[in-house]
């Protein structure tokens, strides 16, 4: 309980609650530094956690990822006398009996250990890695705490969970839990339903009158538009049609699927100059590999861009080139032609 209280105190001290969407108001340029300093304060396990997080730039805001990357090689060293005492405890003799020289200042310092340069009595040079004092005990304590936290989160965290499984974990009736979640979140939660037949979906897509849309939003894998657990269609509708229904199930020819997504839909919505490649039309183009295009978004992990799309052009400008965003924003509001 003392360790848990300290974690909560550190979180409040560095105002980590401001990282949560509900408490984030406006720009917060110091959020990354505060998170890094909090992790350093809490010790090696939390520093390691921050190091792992810093590699997931697809999940974190770039300013936070850049700040956490400093944990890789800028962890403050512990006292030189403590390092010397740890070495002597490990070798069972005074440092002077083994080393002709032992550097007082470390050449590298990390969350678990730091490195001191030394010279042995026979003149051979050595690098001595010294574990931080008490690190084994601290790791065991924090791992146990994190396991408990994970156990609680698994049973209490609602986002992305199946309603039936969550109700069983909480010992509640599903309908009663649904009403509770709606009240707690002030009716702001979304849901994903599983009531459609895959066989019927395939038939509807292939039907001559069937058009293809996403019924989704413009979301992202990072930043404010990456929050929550949305339906995977927001990231993978059209690649799923081309990869799953066309290539794998062969529900319709490739050119038919493309027409249903582009020209057919544009004509039905009366969007002049859209959905076709022609002189004078808007250059909205997608270059994809029909052998590899696929959606990667899942219900459990929806924030994933599809595979097999190297280039995207909107209104004649590249928005995606060689798989990388160009930063261009040539989009415009589209309006139907009035009869």
Image (cartoon, grey):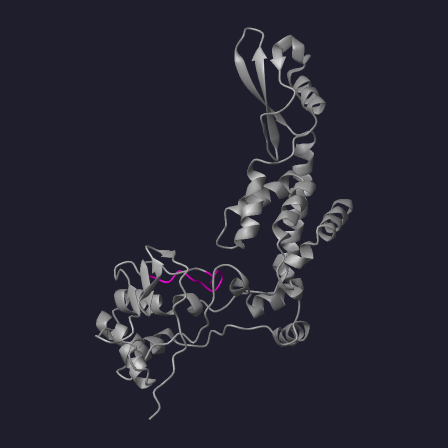
Residue 206 in view: no
Q: Residue at x 39, y 71 (%)?
A: 331
Above or below for 77 versus 38: above
Which of these two is toward me, 256 or 313? 313
On the image, the x and y values in percent for residue 247 come to: 26, 65
Above or below for 5 versus 238: above
Above or below for 191 versus 141: below
How many badges with numbers are in the image? 0
Which of these two is toward me, 105 or 168? 105
Q: Residue at x 47, y 73 (%)?
A: 194
The answer to whether 286 appears left or right of 91 in the picture is: left
| Residues in magenta, as a range | 294-303
Say if the magenta span includes residue 210: no
Which of these two is toward me, 174 or 190? 190
On the image, the x and y values in percent for residue 329 come to: 41, 66
Q: Main secondary structure of the magenta part?
A: loop
On the image, the x and y values in percent for residue 268 come to: 31, 85
Where the C terminus falls, by quadrant? bottom left
Q: Residue furthest top?
A: 122
Q: Residue at x 70, y 31 (%)?
A: 134
Residue 41 in view: yes
Which of these two is toward me, 168 or 219? 219
On the image, the x and y values in percent for residue 46 come to: 63, 43
């Amino acid at each position: 309980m003392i360790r848990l209280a300290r974690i909560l105190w550190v979180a409040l001290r560095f105002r980590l609650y401001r990282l949560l969407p509900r408490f984030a108001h406006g720009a917060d340029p110091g959020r990354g530094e505060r998170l890094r300093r909090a992790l350093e304060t809490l010790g090696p396990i939390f520093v390691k956690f921050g190091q792992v997080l810093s590699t997931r730039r697809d999940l974190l805001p770039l300013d936070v990822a850049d700040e956490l990357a400093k944990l890789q090689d800028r962890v403050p060293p512990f006292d030189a006398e403590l390092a010397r005492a740890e070495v002597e405890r490990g070798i069972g003799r005074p440092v002077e009996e083994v080393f002709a020289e032992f550097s007082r200042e470390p050449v590298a310092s990390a969350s678990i250990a730091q490195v001191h340069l030394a010279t042995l009595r026979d003149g051979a040079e050595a690098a001595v890695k010294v574990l931080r004092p008490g690190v084994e005990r601290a790791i065991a304590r924090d791992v146990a705490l994190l396991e408990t936290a994970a156990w609680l989160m698994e049973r209490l965290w609602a986002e992305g969970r199946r309603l039936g499984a969550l109700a069983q974990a909480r010992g509640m009736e599903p309908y009663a839990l649904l009403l509770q979640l709606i009240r707690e979140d002030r009716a702001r939660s979304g849901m994903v339903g599983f009531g459609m037949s895959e066989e019927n979906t395939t038939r509807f897509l292939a039907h001559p009158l069937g058009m293809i849309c996403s019924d989704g939003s413009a979301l992202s894998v990072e930043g404010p538009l990456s929050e929550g657990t949305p339906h995977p269609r927001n990231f993978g509708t059209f690649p799923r049609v081309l990869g799953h229904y066309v290539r794998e199930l062969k529900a319709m020819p490739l050119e038919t699927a493309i027409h249903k997504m582009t020209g057919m839909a544009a004509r039905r919505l009366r969007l002049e100059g859209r959905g076709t490649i022609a002189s004078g039309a808007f250059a909205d183009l997608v270059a994809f590999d029909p052998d590899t295009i696929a959606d990667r978004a899942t219900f459990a992990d929806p924030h994933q861009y599809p595979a097999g799309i190297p280039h995207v052009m909107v209104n004649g400008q590249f928005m995606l080139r060689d798989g990388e965003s160009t930063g261009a924003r040539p989009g415009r509001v589209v309006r139907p032609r009035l009869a």
